[in-house]
Image (spheres, grey):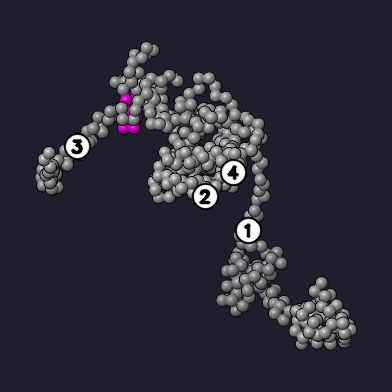
Amino acid sequence: MNELNRLDVIQRSLRGDLTVSTASRLIALTERQIYRLRTKVRTYGPPGIVHGNRGKPSQRKLHQQVADRIVRLARTEYQGFNDTHYTEKLLEEQHLAVSRETVRKLLRAHGLGPKRKRKSPKHRSRRPRKDCAGDMIQFDGSHHDWLSGRGPKLCLLVGIDDATSYPWARFELAETTDGYFRLTKQIIQGNGLFASVYADKHSIFQIEHGRLPTVEEQLAGQLPQTQFERALQELGITLIAAHSPQAKGRVERIHQVFQDRLIAELDRVQASSIAQATPVLNKILGVYRRKFALTAPSAFRSIPVGLDLDACLCHKETRIVANDNCFSFNNRLFQLPPTSNRSSWTKAKIEVHTLPNGLIRAVYQGQIIKTFKPTEGSKPLAQLRKEQAWFRQANSLVTSGSIPCYPVTTSSP
């Protein structure tokens, strides 16, 4: 089309319809070049507008004998060399100054593929939303300086419904299992039981790769599970692992909204703690729900009568009660009292539940024996003896003069 346009302008110039200066402006050429094109078109006709080098081989084209030699060496002496390595060897040993791209094109034209074959990218398609609210909740945590240096660095745990983009969120000191227990309990109490959780491969959700099952798990025929995965299984909720951040894009994108608007609102009120930041968070959640949440049929299930959420959403470990009706947990001994059903718990296999609020429950066959505070138990004898030995050693060092001891002075009342 450019050549046809030039031909039309040159012919109009030859007929006298256009001046040479006007023709040069129309096709962006100098007047000297316009005179040359006028002469060629007047002499050869319309073919004169075509460049004279068209159809001729380039003067820089690689000689056929050199090309045949490069292909022959690649198949024999330098077989298995990659393109860059082979190009360097051609210059060092064969004294052939050829570019890597020329070598690559030449080898590919003769059927010599690359040493390392690259995998073609997989075709990925957008996953459609779930049909009903409660079919899937996406979980993720956002580590950020939410308080802008006015308080501790917090982690915002977020859950968002896949069908409606309805969000839930809460501030925690860190991304922990207990934090997700509290978030899950908050969602269930407000809406009901949901069908599945979509989360990344964090060690909170998925057991670390390579971890072998314990002897008890092998005897029970169970695979290793995290505490959160076990809790979801007890509630009838399926845990689905996302293989990339893009797979759970809804919860990833909402972090951008919170890191923009929520931080601005927190700075406005100068929040410096979780207690001060939570009302601001609830306000932002309400605005987001009104503006962006969609409507869909609800698939949330009602909570069964008698279901104790704390008995599911907690850490569970097994202990064997000693002869003195005590069990050891977290370097402390806890005494079990007699009950109306059982006077002694010796050799009983109990479950120890650690609730998200820190309380410790001793449970036997689904029945709660007693609930303890974390500091309620006494330290084991071995731990006490270790501490006593440490104090005796420290006192001996002080009395021997190895460590100077300075008297403590107190002011008179």
Which amino acid is tagged 3?
Ala
Which amino acid is tagged 1?
Lys
Q: Nearer the viewer, mark 3 or mark 1?
A: 3
Task: State the predominant SS element of the stretch in magenta.
Answer: strand
Q: Which residue sits at x=41%, y=27%?
A: 353
* Residue 14 magenta-highlighted: no
Q: Nearer the viewer, residue 204 or 136?
A: 136
Among the 4 quarters of the image, the one containing residue 297: top right
Which residue bears the numbered disc 4? 250
* Badge 1 or badge 4: first in the primary sequence: 1
Q: Position of residue 193 (x, y in %)?
A: 56, 28
Asked which secondary structure carries label 1, the reply is: loop
Are the residues tagged 2 and 3 within 8 Å (C-beta)?
no
Region in magenta: 326-334
Asked which secondary structure carries label 4, the reply is: helix
* Badge 4 or badge 2: first in the primary sequence: 4
Whether residue 3 sits left or right of residue 152 in the image: it is right
Separation of marks 1 and 4 at Cα, in angstroms: 35 Å
Which residue bears the numbered disc 2? 260
Which residue bears the numbered disc 3? 389
Q: Which residue sits at x=62%, y=71%?
A: 100
Q: Nearer the viewer, mark 1 or mark 4?
A: 4
* Badge 3 or badge 1: first in the primary sequence: 1
Quadrant position of the N terminus in the picture = bottom right
Q: Position of residue 66 (x, y in %)?
A: 68, 77
Which amino acid is tagged 2?
Asp
Few, some or many C-alpha atoms within 10 Å of disc 1 (few <14, some 14-19, many ≥20)? few
Are the residues tagged 4 and 2 within 8 Å (C-beta)?
no
